Amino acid sequence: MTTLVDTLREGYGFAQPVVTLGAALDGTTVVPEPKVAIPLAMMNRHGLIAGATGTGKTKTLQLLAEQLSAQGVAVFVADVKGDVSGLAPPGYAHPPSRSGSPPSRRCGSRGARRSSSSVSPAGTGFRSAPP
């Protein structure tokens, strides 16, 4: 007879990098291993986290965003209530330029940065410290 642990190993035994969601439940018992996970290669799609109040939607979103960012994946989170605002370091405002365009858009600007290293860990696009 196949046990839950055997089924989990078969379904979640990925060799490639994964985003870990957590542990499975067998009734009221937590099954610590193997962890429930999604292959990183599958995380190139849109996602929706839905549920009733108090079911862990915000924590799930935070868990996913942190792990994806740690793997170098850009993350966009539409957070109307500000529940996950603590994921990114505070940004700073650029001083206005004479040309009217932000420093990153000005041609030949010495302060312009175009590399992904200027993006915060949560992928918000804000720099955590002035250049």
Image (cartoon, rainbow, N blue to C red):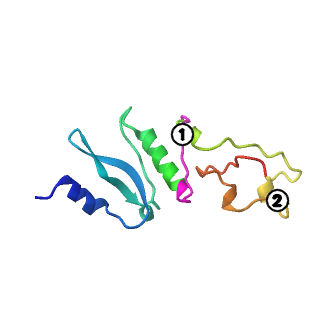
Specify which label sits upstream in the sequence, 2 or 1: 1
Q: Position of residue 18 (x, y in %)?
A: 42, 60
The residue tagged 2 is 106
Tag of residue 84: 1
Front-most of residues 101 and 37:
37
Circle 1: residue type: Val
Q: Is residue 78 magenta?
A: yes
Q: Residue at x 50, y 49 (%)?
A: 65
Provide the residue span drawn in magenta.
Answer: 70-82
How far apart in space, not on screen, are marks 2 and 1 (Cα)?
32 Å
In the figure, residue 119 lies in which quadrant?
bottom right
Mark 1 surroundings within 10 Å by alpha-carbon count, few (fewer than 14), some (14 through 19), many (20 or more): some
Q: Is residue 110 left or right of residue 54?
A: right
Q: Secondary structure at mark 2?
A: loop
Q: Position of residue 5 (x, y in %)?
A: 22, 54
Q: Secondary structure at mark 1?
A: loop
In the figure, residue 17 lies in which quadrant?
bottom left
Q: Residue furthest bottom?
A: 15
- Of circles 2 and 1, which is in front? 1
Q: Is residue 68 magenta?
A: no
